Amino acid sequence: MTAQTLNFPVPASLGSLENYIQAVNRFPILSAEEEQTLARRFREEEDLEAARRLVLSHLRLVVSIARGYLGYGLPHADLIQEGNVGLMKAVKRYDPERGVRLVSFAVHWIKAEIHEFILRNWRLVKVATTKAQRKLFFNLRSLKTGEGSLSPAEVEAMAGALNVRREDVREMETRLYGQDVALEPALDDDEDAYAPIAYLAAPDAEPTAKLEQRERERLATTGLAKALETLDPRSRHIIEARWLKEDDTATLHELAAEYGISAERVRQIEAKALQKLRAAMSA
């Protein structure tokens, strides 16, 4: 179920966000009886027109919820778009027999989609991956009272209120309020030496170092090939199957079945072959 299948307006389709908001505010709010009738029609008959009317009557709810997340610097229209996805998921899962209005049920799904969108797009570096971090991410702004850093007492109170560690509060504060730094200097900036690109370069990025690294890798590959030649065919096959495949490496039991021996015997052959390889490559 998508916006296209249900044929309802999206922010981009009406030219401007203001036009979209005016349009969704004109859709009538359903009574409890109308809502239940439409929800049953959709659940029992897969009536998409019924689902469409349920969605249309709650688009203004998405606009309202999305407005509460404008502090993260993302476009209101994008937040609304994601919230609409959550609304459609709510309509799809809504059970009118539980005695709960759709508006109460939909809030969770709308916020969940908006949260996911913010976490994916707010910064290049993900700021919240664990459950505790997500909780902090969406509550720290509202709980913080001043402009400066949190005091120890505020950290303690916030950690207790959200049931997270004090260290988590400090870390999330740093992530949220730390400034993004450009990797390269601006075009009109003469202070190139102070841009991160100047001091974050890999130590082996210098051309001579890269050539030396490439030569070491070539020699190592050649040395391994010569060392493998010292092994008998069975030992060589076991080493190649167990260690030199990029994927789908063989197990001890698979090789045991192939050679008609025990897995322990394969392990012993492997260990002896590895020992012989190390000796040949260090010679």
Image (cartoon, rainbow, N blue to C red):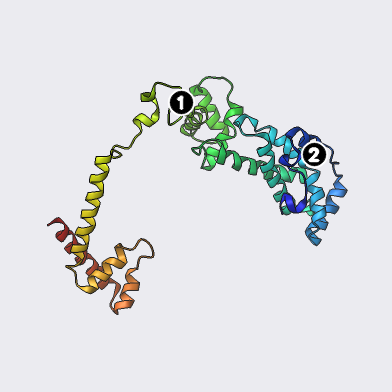
Q: How far apart are marks 1 and 2 (CA)?
A: 44 Å
Q: Position of residue 182 (x, y in %)?
A: 46, 29
Viewer-side residue, 82 vs 189: 189
Q: How crowded is mark 2: few (under 14 residues within 10 Å), some or many (20 or more)?
A: many
User: Which badge, 1 or 2, comes first in the chain's sequence?
Assistant: 2
Q: Position of residue 19 (x, y in %)?
A: 78, 35
Amino acid type indicated by mark 1: Leu
On the question of residue 101 being in view, the answer is no
Q: Quadrant of residue 281?
A: bottom left
On the question of residue 54 being in view, the answer is yes
Viewer-side residue, 3 vs 128: 3
Q: Residues within 10 Å of mark 1 (few under 14, many from 20)?
A: few
Left or right of 22, for residue 263: left
Provide the secondary structure element on which disc 1 rests.
Answer: loop
Q: Position of residue 35 (x, y in %)?
A: 84, 49
Q: In this view, does 260 lie above or below 220?
A: below
* Residue ID at (65%, 31%): 70
* Residue ID at (71%, 44%): 84
* Residue ID at (82%, 56%): 40
Viewer-side residue, 88 vs 19: 19
Residue at the extreme left: 283
Is the Cβ of the residue at disc 1 closer than 8 Å to that at disc 2? no
Picture disc at residue 187: 1
* Residue ID at (49%, 37%): 125
Quarter holding the C terminus is bottom left
Residue at the extreme bottom: 260
**Label 2: which residue?**
24
Quarter holding the N terminus is bottom right
Q: Position of residue 264 (x, y in %)?
A: 27, 71
Left or right of 226, for residue 185: right
